[in-house]
Amino acid sequence: MKGNFLHTIATIAFVCMMSHHAEAINLFSEQARQSAGNMGIVMDFMERYFSEIEVHDAQSQKIRMYDDKVFFTEGDITDLKLVNDTMPLTITCREKHYFVKWTVNDQPFITVVFPAQFELVMGMNHDEAKKHFKNMVLDADTSCIRHQVSTDNLVDYNDSIGRFQSEYFEIESLNDASYYVRANDNWIPLFDNQYQEFSAANLMHGLIDTVDYPLHVEQSMYGGETNSYDIRLSQWINYCIGQGHKVFFAVEEVREDGILAIVIAQNRELNYNHLMSIVFPNGFIDKHQTVLKAKITPFIPTHNVKNLYQQQYTKHKRRKW
């Protein structure tokens, strides 16, 4: 066991040392990425992983892939050079494994299978990921693209507002609910000063594409340190969509200066969560340059997030920030 572990570490170290010699493998066009929805993280992994191991001989590649449990059930690594946009692509996750498949003439051409495991897919552990989190969010698009939610199953919240909810996280108030109002014969996402709590929920669920607030972030780092930086709200929302996060929202406190809310962005396949506390000042809906302030603890393993959420809730209720 110890020998295998040392061998894996040595292999990874060698890959890191040699990676600057490798040419990046581009398997997915921009169009493919745009249509991939929340599977961008899988595309990133495929291109990074096979760019890294391409510098090695065939036997070393087999050893690395065997250690990482990355397998071709159709085709092999050399076939990746033949991939193009004319080949239908599907990416799925089932039984804690990702399946990436290209087909030719309705027949499987390449199928790559690998575990939905955080350190493998992300290429780093949770503590290392926290160091890179800022850049991950900053790399996200700043365009305000409205996230589409079906309005077929709305229920009446009152005479003028429809509500849609599919699930909640641990407690019913922390949920994915979104709110809509009638405009002619259509339902449109609610964004109105009379309903600041509902509007904040819609904003964090990516349903509002008419505004893009500055967002000041204080990020928790390893060892109790914090990292402060500024992003756009659109970058946070597009990052969450691109990484396949399910977003849950709850109003924790209605204060004199505004609303204190909790947001959990959950990646179920890789079993991690980002926990955000965010303040929406009074009047933010009409003041589009209002700076929203947030505290974020990223990459929390799912089995730890409930305890940390309770700690955050107690701490932030005790003081204003």
Image (cartoon, grey):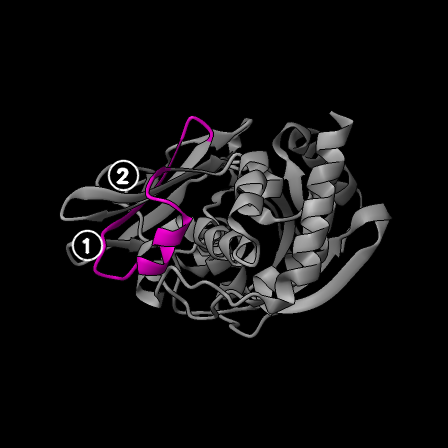
Residue 21 appears in which quarter of the rendering?
bottom right
Q: Is residue 254 above or below residue 213?
A: above
Q: At 70% from the left edge and 67% from the top edge, which residue is drawn?
A: 229
Is 17 positioned to the left or the right of 93 in the image? right
State the image coordinates of residue 190 (x, y, percent, origin top left): 36, 55
Q: Dot 2 corresponds to which residue?
A: 154
Residue 226 appears in which quarter of the rendering?
bottom right
The disc labelled 2 sits on which kind of residue? Leu
Quarter holding the C terminus is: bottom right
Task: Say few, some or many: other residues with alpha carbon within 10 Å of mark 1 (under 14 / 14 to 19 / 20 or more).
Answer: few
Res. 243 in view: yes
Q: Which segment is the magenta one?
A: 73-96
Q: Is residue 205 above or below residue 302?
A: below
Is 110 positioned to the left or the right of 201 in the image? left
State the image coordinates of residue 311 (x, y, percent, origin top left): 75, 35
Q: Is residue 155 above or below residue 19?
A: above
Number of numbered discs:
2
Dot 1 falls on a residue whose secondary structure is: strand
Q: Earlier in the sequence, mark 1 or mark 2?
A: 2
State the image coordinates of residue 38 (x, y, percent, origin top left): 41, 49
Q: Dot 1 corresponds to which residue?
A: 186
144 or 80, nearer to the observer: 80
39 or 171, nearer to the observer: 39
Q: At 56% from the left edge and 65% from the top edge, which residue is drawn?
A: 22
